Amino acid sequence: MQHTPGNWHAKDGQIYPTETGKTLALIPYFDEKDIEKQANQQLIAAAPDLLNALAMFIHSVEHEGVIFGIVTSAVENAKQAISKATI
């Protein structure tokens, strides 16, 4: 993994990891009343979760086959990541 690890968060147009709290990205001209900019910051902050959920899903299908419990877990992770990525 070459990107900054950990959970990323978004606040006031800034995206930062929990571990360091240092800004990774900024949403230019962020306005909390602008729904599109809010949605963009949430999507960027959720990028590591989305990547992890997708990787887990692919791994479970390729290596574990379609086993209900494993696929259910992968789907739940994907749903949580999507929830974090959306307003």
Image (tube, rainbow, N blue to C red):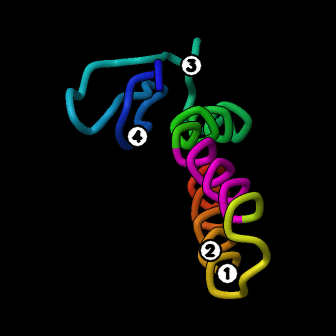
Q: Which residue is mark 1?
A: 72
Query: Callout 3: helix, strand or loop?
Result: loop
Q: Position of residue 26 (x, y in %)?
A: 49, 16
Q: Amino acid at mark 2?
A: Glu
Task: Name the residue located 61 percent from the left edge and 38 percent from the top edge.
Answer: 38
- Label 1's element? helix
| Three-letter amino acid code at the position of disc 1 | Thr
Residue located 64% across and 68% down the image: 74
In the rendered structure, are the residues bearing label 2 and label 1 in contact, judged by CB atoms less than 8 Å apart?
A: yes
Magenta stretch bounds: 49-60
Residue 67 x, y percent position in the rendering: 72, 83
Judging by the rendered image, the residue that carries numbered circle 4 is: 9
Report if residue 9 lies within the magenta region: no
Q: Amino acid at mark 3?
A: Ile
- Please report the residue visible at 63 percent of the width from the left and 78 percent of the height from the top: 70
Q: Which residue is mark 3?
A: 27
Looking at the picture, which amino acid does disc 4 mark?
A: His
Residue name at image x 66 percent, y 33 percent? 40
Q: Are marks 4 and 2 in contact (CB under 8 Å)?
A: no
Distance between mark 3 and mark 2 Cα atoms: 29 Å
Give the Cα separation between the discs numbered 4 and 2.
20 Å
Pointer 2: what residue?
76
Relative to residue 45, is residue 85 depicted above or below? below
